[in-house]
Amino acid sequence: MRRDVWDWLEEAKEEQTTAMHLYAAGRYAHACFHAQQAAEKAFKALIIFHRKIVHRSHDLLELYSEVKDCLELDVEVMEGLAELSAYYTQARYPNAGLRRPSLEIGKAQAERALKIAKGVLDAVARMFA
């Protein structure tokens, strides 16, 4: 595997680990943000692998559209991409959809975000197995 692809994939794994630690600490909004970052970086690793231009986007649906011809996601994961994508802003900023993300994003939402991100990372990792 090329070094640039490896670097993106490893950073995706770091984001996933961070999300899990934050979830365990009850920091659900931040766990959702890092879950989004894990999926984003995994998609970007695959985009780079295919020598495509990585656009400055945090929209997981847009990034997935770049690799959907070669990456098969479970239906539940694919259907959750829009929800996970929204956490890029909603989980961090007051009044970006939620008044107080740290108070309004709960355990169930974080569990779902982690599950969706894991689905993306697992699917991308299988491409390199």
Image (cartoon, rainbow, N blue to C red):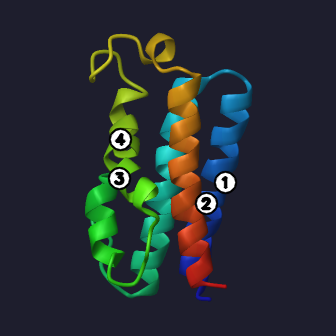
Disc 4 to disc 1, how far (Cα)? Answer: 21 Å
Q: Give the residue drawn at x 42%, y 26%.
A: 92
Q: CA distance from mark 3 to mark 1?
A: 24 Å
| Residue 110 point in image, percent of width and height | 55, 32
Q: Earlier in the sequence, mark 4 or mark 2?
A: 2
Q: Which mark is residue 83?
A: 4
Residue linked to disc 1? 14
The answer to which image quadrant residue 84 occupies is: top left
Task: Assign the C terminus to one quadrant of the image.
Answer: bottom right
- The residue positioned 40% from the left and 61% from the top of the image is 75
Which class describes the residues within 10 Å of circle 2: few (<14), some (14-19), or many (20+)?
some
**Vertical arrangement, residue 62 with respect to residue 100, above or below:** below
Specify the amino acid type for callout 4. Glu
Closest to the camera, between mark 4 and mark 1, is: 4
Q: Nearer the viewer, mark 4 or mark 2?
A: 4
Q: Give the image quarter of residue 62.
A: bottom left
Residue 13: horizontal and vertical position, in percent?
65, 58
Q: Are marks 2 and 1 in contact (CB under 8 Å)?
A: yes
Q: Which residue is mark 2?
A: 11
Question: Which quarter shows the N terminus?
Answer: bottom right
Amino acid, disc 2: Glu
> Badge 3 local density, few (<14 within 10 Å), some, or many (20+)?
few
Element under label 4? helix
The residue carrying mark 3 is 79
